Amino acid sequence: MKLRLKVWRQKSANDKGYFEDHTLEANEHMSFLEMMDVMNEELIQQKKEPVAFEHDCREGICGACSLVINGQPHGPMQGTTTCQLHMRHFNDGDTIHIEPYRANAFPVIKDLVVDRSSFDRIIQAGGYISVSTGQAEDGNAIPINRNDSSLAFDAATCIGCAACVAACPNASAMLFTSAKVSHLALLPQGKVEASRRALKMVNQMDEEGFGRCSNITACEAECPKGISIDNIARMNREYLSASLVGEEK
Amino acid sequence: MGWFSRFLTSSIGQKLIMSLTGLFLILFLMVHLAGNLQLLADDGGHSFNVYADFMAHNGLIQFVSKGNFFFIVLHAVLGISLWLRNRAARGGQKYAVTNVRAVNTHPGFAKNMAVLGVIVFVFILIHLYQFWLQMKLDNVALVSYEGGAELSDLYEKVKIAFLNPMFVIFYVVSMAVIAFHLWHGFQSAFQSLGLNHKKYTPIIQFLGKVYAILVPLGFAIIPIIFYLKNS
Ligand code: HEM
Ligand code: FES
């Protein structure tokens, strides 16, 4: 299959970026990233600079791959990451726009690679539980409601890829932050610090310069793991009660 | 008060204000519509004028109406400031291709709440100038029914306004814009408050759609009927 690619090139955060045109002969069994590899090999053979993009596991679990493909983070398929997207979902002769995630809180490092360390700082602010060192506890000693453990697990499937921010017209990070807040708040081990966690993580999220949620739900629609905005409602509850009723200042 | 101002300026605190003011306006619209439907009674404006007179002279109603003005302004100012902030959060470089999908709401309305809101705001200003301000300035003729006390004949004012087809169109279009704003806004207000529940959210979403259609439709039908009856 013959493709026309319009790929975003940008030397660094401070340089102006532009779209570069490539035509490419791809094969429908390739993954999207393999197609990008082929493009880069051609560039290297022509002694040109290859396009920088992120990837690691290439099996949809690490959250490293990104890209906004024809206006959609991780491309047109629902419930998949870019590394799991196959070229058979495109047609011969298609023009494909490939852009980096665009958000103030994610400055471009190079080409399609953006700096997502603002997510790390949100996690550092409270996305953890404190456990005393010593003998490991028996995992089954604490009873956990089946429904809560399922909901916590659903939230925990968030791979932190930031497609939610890329998809959100407001560049808001509420889905990511709420998945982390929910995942821990639903479990007994996480409940202990739930109030402080909600305050700190939301505070950090606001400080990083993400936009604010308007409940547009584009995040849920584009999330490769299908994280639900129910988590955002849960975080709102946690934050409202922590702010208005909780003792923490 | 440090914690309180931090709360009110936080993303979730501001959502709370948007949502509570929005819900207040939703309640207000229902009451306003119930009153206005008396314009359709076939009594030469008697019941409507009595109602308008009651509303204008009841202390409690006047107090709530001050609150209503305040909430509209608060909702609008905060809504516009959120809009500007959210546009800035995207960064200087916009996407060349956009393709917004949504779950259980209309992405076009959801994404353009502020644009819809600004149109509603302009409508509100013109609407207030046309009826409310004229009442306040006593620019409304008096009428009395069966030898009773004299009342402002707001009914007549409405009748004259809607002889002009441009006003009729303006009102109908503005009601459509309110419908779009609420198609997203009604259920969004509940989600913002954290009121999301497997059992109740589908009901809220359904009621929101019913409200977003019926209430603006109820308002829009008044100028249309007046125009058809009187012109
Ligand atoms: C006066 C002009 C208005 C403006 C500028 C405006 C603006 C907005 C904006 C920007 C939002 C999205 C808030 C966000 O992103 O968090 C919004 C939400 C909303 N608006 Fe308005 N609006 C206006 C009038 C109205 C009116 C008249 C009503 C009710 C009849 C209303 C009801 C709502 C509701 C219920 C929401 C949802 C709140 C939420 O998302 O939490 N608005 N409005
Ligand atoms: S490369 Fe790991 S999720 Fe795509």
Image: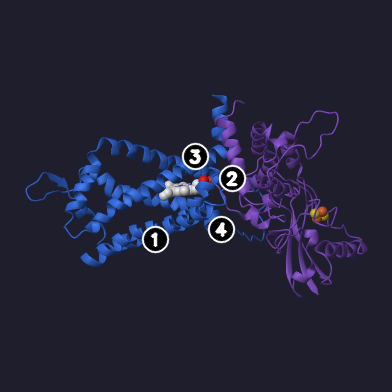
Instruction: Name the N-terminal-most of marks 4 and 1.
Output: 4
Same chain? Circles 4 and 3: yes
Task: Name the side, left or right, on which B3 lies relative to A50.
Answer: left
Compared with B179, A116 (above or below) is above
Same chain? Circles 2 and 1: no
Q: Residue at x 56, y 45 (%)?
A: B84
Where residue A64 sits: x, y (%)? 80, 51
Say which mark, if any, is on residue A116. Answer: none
Q: Is residue A53 visible?
A: no
- The letter of the blue chain is B
Alpha carbon separation for disc pair 3 and 2: 15 Å
Task: Name the side, left or right, on which A83 lies relative to A209.
Answer: right
**Does dot 4 land on a helix, a strand or a loop?**
loop
Say which mark, if any, is on residue B173. Answer: 1
User: Dot 3: few (<14), some (14–19), or many (≥20) neighbours within 10 Å?
Assistant: many
Compared with A22, B135 (above or below) is above
- Subunit that carries the residue with mark 3: B
Q: Residue at x 82, y 34 (%)?
A: A137
Q: Residue at x 37, y 37 (%)?
A: B67
User: What residue is disc 3 on?
Assistant: B17
Closer to us: B116 or A240: A240
The quarter of the rendered structure image containing the C terminus of chain B is: bottom left
User: What residue is disc 4 on?
Assistant: B104
Q: How many marks?
A: 4
Which kind of residue does numbered mark 3 sit on?
Answer: Ile
